[in-house]
Amino acid sequence: MPKISVEVPQELLDDLDDHVGGEGKFVNRSEAIRASIRKTLDTLDEIDQRHGRLDDES
């Protein structure tokens, strides 16, 4: 799996960390970020589909 590097404002990182770990919804930061990316892309696909910008084969 490729690795990427991103800069994240401390405020977002603090909020992310509230959802990671034993008491959180995600095992680690990477899982939380991947889930967020997937959800965002799914949402964008839904918007594109509503506006007729998405091929049926995608």
Image (cartoon, helix red, strand yellow):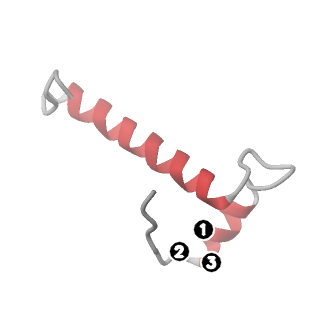
User: Of all residues shown, which one is farthest toward the top?
Assistant: 56
Looking at the image, residue 17 lies above or below residue 51:
below
Task: Tell me whether the residue at label 1 lies in contact with that at label 3, contact meaning CB atoms closer than 8 angstroms.
Answer: yes
Classify the position of the C terminus by image quarter: top left
Cβ atoms under marks 2 and 1 closer than 8 Å: yes
Residue hosting label 1? 12
Q: Residues within 10 Å of mark 3 (few under 14, many from 20)?
A: few
- Residue at the location (65% across, 60% down)? 29
Q: What element does badge 2 sit on?
A: loop
For disc 3, the marked residue is 10
Give the CA distance from mark 2 to mark 3: 6 Å
Q: Tag 1: residue type? A: Leu
- Judged left or right of residue 51, residue 36 is right
Viewer-proximal residue among 14 and 55:
55
Left or right relative to 21: residue 54: left
Residue 31 or residue 24, whichever sits in front? 31
**Residue behind mark 2:** 8
Residue 38: x %, y % from top left: 45, 43
Disc number at residue 39? none
Residue 5 position (above or below residue 39): below
Name of the residue lying farthest toward the right: 23
Do residues under tags 2 and 3 come within 8 Å of each other at their CB atoms? yes
Q: What residue type is labelled 3?
A: Gln
Quadrant including the N terminus: bottom left
